[in-house]
Image (cartoon, helix red, strand yellow):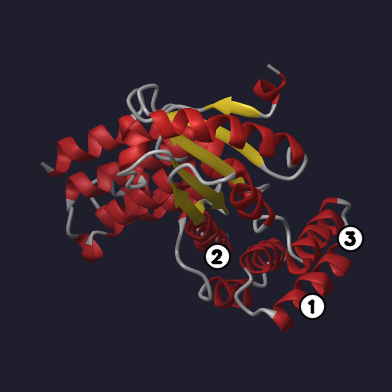
Amino acid sequence: MATQQVVHDVTDADFQTAVIEASRTRPVVVDFWAAWCGPCRILGPVIERVAEDYADSIVVAKLNVDENPMSSGQYRVQGIPAVKAFRDGRVVDEFTGALPEPHVRQFFESLLPSATDQAVAAAEALLAQGDEAGAEQAYRSVLGQQSDNRGAVVGLAGLLAGRQDYDEAESLLKRLPPDREVKVLQHRIFLERYAKKHAGEDLAAEAQAAPSDPRARYRWGLLLAANEQYREALDELLASVRLNRNWEDGAARKSMLAIFELLGMDATLTREFQRKLENVLF
C-alpha cells in the first residue's frame, strides 16, 4: 500500500524517539487502535488518505494499544480509536471515535504551522547558517508578539547561553513549563556557570586530598559533568551521597538526577547509576 510510506507503526520501545522527540520538528499524529476494534477499521483508511495529503508537514503513526499498553496508559487512552496530535513533546489536540473525513482533514489542517511557527523556523535556519545576529533578531521579533512562544524562547535562550549571557537565558526559560528540554538547557547553563566560576581551582586535587569529604567529591563531580565526563562525574557524586546523603539538602543526589535528565532516562549510563543510587539510598 502506498499509505505505508506515510503512516508508520510505533511501539512502546520507540515512542519517545518516534513521537515525542520527532514532534519537536514537525507535528506528529498518533492513531491509537486495536485489531478487534470495528470503528478503528473505519477510521484507519481515512487517516491514511488524509496523511498522504499532509505528508510533507505532519508525521502520522499508529500504535496498537493491546501490544503497547505503556504508551496508551501514559496518555490515558480509554476509548479507541483515539487520535492525539503531539507538538514540542506534548499533546496539543485530540479526538476519539471514527470521525468523518472532513472532520479529520480539519483536525490535520489545524496542526499546520502558523505564521509565528514559520518565523521561528526561519530564525532556526539563520542560526544553523551561522547568522547569530539575524537569528537573535528574528527570535526577539517573535517574542515581541508572543512572549511565551516555546520555539523562540528555547532558541534564543540557547543562543544566549552559548555566548554566556546566562542571566537573560535563565530568565527566558522561566516563561515555559519545565519539561525535559527546558530542564536540560537549565542544567547545562548551571554547569557552564559552575565551570566558569571554578576555572582557577584544582578541584581534582581537592577531592584526592579529602576523599572522605562529601563537599570535595561533589565539587569535583560537578566540574567533570561540566566537561561532559559523565561516568566519572556520576562516580564522584555517588561517592558524595555515600559519605553523607543529606549534605546540603541532598545536593549530590539532585545533581545525579540532573545528569540523568541530560543523558536521557533510557541511556545505559543513566540506568546503571540509577540502580547504584537506589542501592545507596534504600
Q: Residue at x 68, y 29 (%)?
A: 6
Circles 2 and 3 in contact, beta carbons < 8 Å? no
Q: Amino acid at mark 1?
A: Ser
Circle 1 residue: 141
Q: Residue at x 34, y 49 (%)?
A: 257
Q: Residues within 10 Å of mark 3 (few under 14, many from 20)?
A: few
Q: Residues within 10 Å of mark 1 (few under 14, many from 20)?
A: some
Q: Position of residue 239 (x, y in %)?
A: 26, 42
Residue 8 visible to an observer of this rendering: yes
Question: Which is more N-terminal, label 1 or label 3?
Answer: 3
User: In front: mark 3 or mark 1?
Assistant: 1
Q: Position of residue 247 (x, y in %)?
A: 21, 61
Q: Quadrant of residue 235?
A: top left
Residue 228 visible to an observer of this rendering: no
Q: Nearer the viewer, residue 273 or 45?
A: 45
Q: Amino acid at mark 2?
A: Arg
Q: Residue at x 50, y 28 (%)?
A: 10
Check the picture and name the quadrant holding the C terminus: top left
User: In front: mark 2 or mark 1?
Assistant: 1
Circle 3 residue: 131
Check the image and report above or below for 14 versus 196: above
Question: Which is more N-terminal, label 1 or label 2?
Answer: 1
Q: Nearer the viewer, residue 47 or 151?
A: 47
Question: Which is more N-terminal, label 3 or label 2?
Answer: 3
Circle 2 residue: 193
Of all residues shown, which one is farthest toward the left? 282
Q: How far, Cα to Cα, is label 3 from label 1?
A: 15 Å
Q: Amino acid at mark 3?
A: Asp
